[in-house]
Amino acid sequence: MSQFDLSPDVFVMPTAGGAYHSICTRDPGASRDLVLALLRHEVSPRASVEQICSWVGVPDEQRALAVVHRAQALGWIQGHEQPQTLGDRGVGRELQHLLPALSSVGQSLLVDRNGLPLASTGMDGDLAETLAALSADLIAVQERHAPRLTRHLGTASHGWAAVDAYGSSRIGAWPLYIGEAPLMLVLLGEPRLNLPQFLSMAWLLMNRYG
């Protein structure tokens, strides 16, 4: 096995892509465990080899560092010279600030498994209520059928969409596995899940609910 080293001067954070691949599925994996562990910190850590072994559940140092190397190669983690800090405006205010950027039309909704909106932006009350009720049903469908869809179709993403005649998404819904209970992120227009705001949202939710 190749020998890996860990830079002692870098503060480690997930990327938006790493956050997406780690909270939008329950598929097990050491790289996912690493990203979730990082998201549970309020301040990005300067990781030590001992910490990484604990986070990924691998006692062997070189195997644990190989997980870090793979996560970096996948673009799931990034290093900063200075520590990054979670916002402190409160969950509700932070979500209201972050969610609009995730939709090309600024219309976003985050719902718990019971259909209770945690935050919504750019929607009137009737639309938010309708999509919240739909989201609760989609979460139930997702919980029942996702394992079989993954097994038979090999789907890498478990999102759902209402599409137009050209197959373009008009409404997209993504389950977010934060802790034990899934949430549903609903976006109108084109999704923008590769932005820093998605990472900030995942970080916030993991600290609050994970």
Image (spheres, helix red, strand yellow):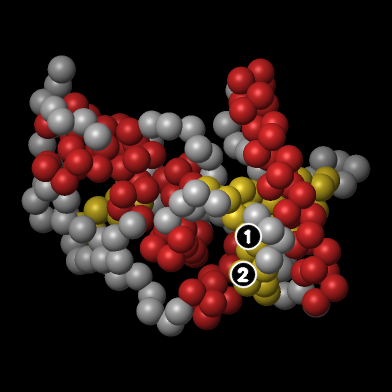
The spot of residue 135 in percent (x, y) is 73, 54
Q: Residues within 10 Å of mark 1 (few under 14, many from 20)?
A: many
Q: Which mark is residue 112?
A: 1
- Residue type for callout 2: Leu
Residue farthest right in this picture = 165
Q: Is residue 27 above or below residue 15?
A: above
**Left or right: 199 with respect to 45?**
right
Q: Is residue 24 above or below residue 65?
A: below
Residue at image position (74%, 47%) is 138
- Residue type for callout 1: Asp
Mark 2–mark 1 CB contact (< 8 Å)? yes
Residue at image position (43%, 32%) is 28
The spot of residue 178 in percent (x, y) is 49, 52
Quarter of the picture containing the N terminus is top left
Quarter of the picture containing the C terminus is bottom left
The spot of residue 134 in percent (x, y) is 79, 55
Residue at image position (25%, 43%) is 55
